[in-house]
Amino acid sequence: MVMSQIHKGMPVNTSTPLMVRRLLVDLSQGFPRHWLAGKPFRTQYFNALSMSFPVGEQEFIDSVREAAQSLPDSPENASLRATIQDFVGQEATHRRVHGLYNAELEKQGLHNHWQHWAGDLIALGRQHKVPAMRRLAITAALEHYTAVMADLTLRHPPVLAGAEPALQTLWRWHAAEETEHKAVAFDLFHTLGGDYRARVRGYAFAMLHFTLMATGQTINNLWHDRVLFKPGTWLDAARFFFGRYGLIWLSTAPLLAYLRRDFHPWQHDNRKLAEQWLSGNSEQYTVVRGPKAA
């Protein structure tokens, strides 16, 4: 799919049919404090990301639903409407699973500040009546970030090498579904007439606030983990960001691709990565809605 195929005001749905799955991983027995190969920094970074998801996924659902109310109820929009419902189902499942994950983090003594920072920001936007299209632009931008991280998680096994099996499964399942629906908010934005300038403004806002909150929550996690000032923590951080499979090298170009005028999520078509993981790990989930659930 290239942007030349997308025209303002015309219905766009580039996603293949989505399935809503229930993950079968049991987190109730807990997991090690440094579940990612015993490495504190990367463990607490991923923990911080999880802390953002219950509030974040709900905002994605709400912003897409609100914007979709402007879609004319016509046959040409039926496919996009159906995909949006499946998008909502997937995101709601992610929200629930990460809520269980975060409950275990609380038992380990971590404090989820990100949910309050994000919740306050969302409430402020509602108080000032931020337009639905602006909220959708921010959602589309954050969906791009999660899609880039999902691709790294699936494409480069060393990113999660040595992780506790249950959490490795959780993160890769989440990555597969984020890959499947990565274009839904973007397609809705363009179907409703969203333009390049609005998309870039949404991206700048999203990346600034996401970076600040991710940094703050990770540092807070390290503080409560009592490893913030240990040299090994920051050696791990350096390797995590700048090592052979460092996030800086792997994510910068894909993240900046969003700023191209002709950008579309499926210009980087990595559906096969998601399909391979899902087909190879079918015992880890059940399909509750979708073509194979009937």
Image (cartoon, rainbow, N blue to C red):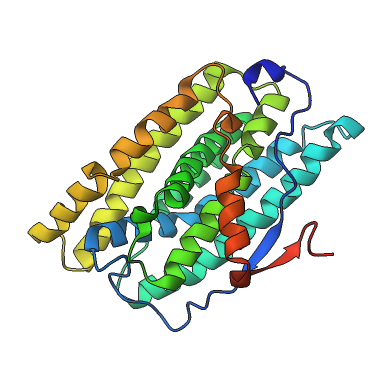
> Relative to 135, is 105 on the left or the right?
left
In the image, residue 121 sits, relative to residue 110, either above or below, namely: above
State the residue lying farthest toward the right: 75
Return the residue nearer the eye: 250 or 126. Answer: 250
Q: State whether residue 264 appears in this view.
A: yes
Number of marks drawn: 0
Quadrant for the C terminus in the image: bottom right
Quadrant for the N terminus in the image: top right
Return the residue nearer the eye: 218 or 172. Answer: 172
> Relative to 185, is 210 on the left or the right?
left
At horizontal 50% and vertical 71% (from top left) the residue drawn is: 100
In the image, residue 76 sits, relative to residue 214, either above or below, namely: above
Return the residue nearer the eye: 65 or 293. Answer: 293
At horizontal 42% and vertical 59% (from top left) the residue drawn is: 51
Residue 66 pos. (x, y %): 70, 40
Which quadrant of the structure image shows residue 20? bottom right
> Relative to 104, is 268 on the left or the right?
right
Which quadrant of the structure image shows residue 276? bottom right
State the residue lying farthest toward the bottom: 29
Which quadrant of the structure image shows residue 112? bottom left
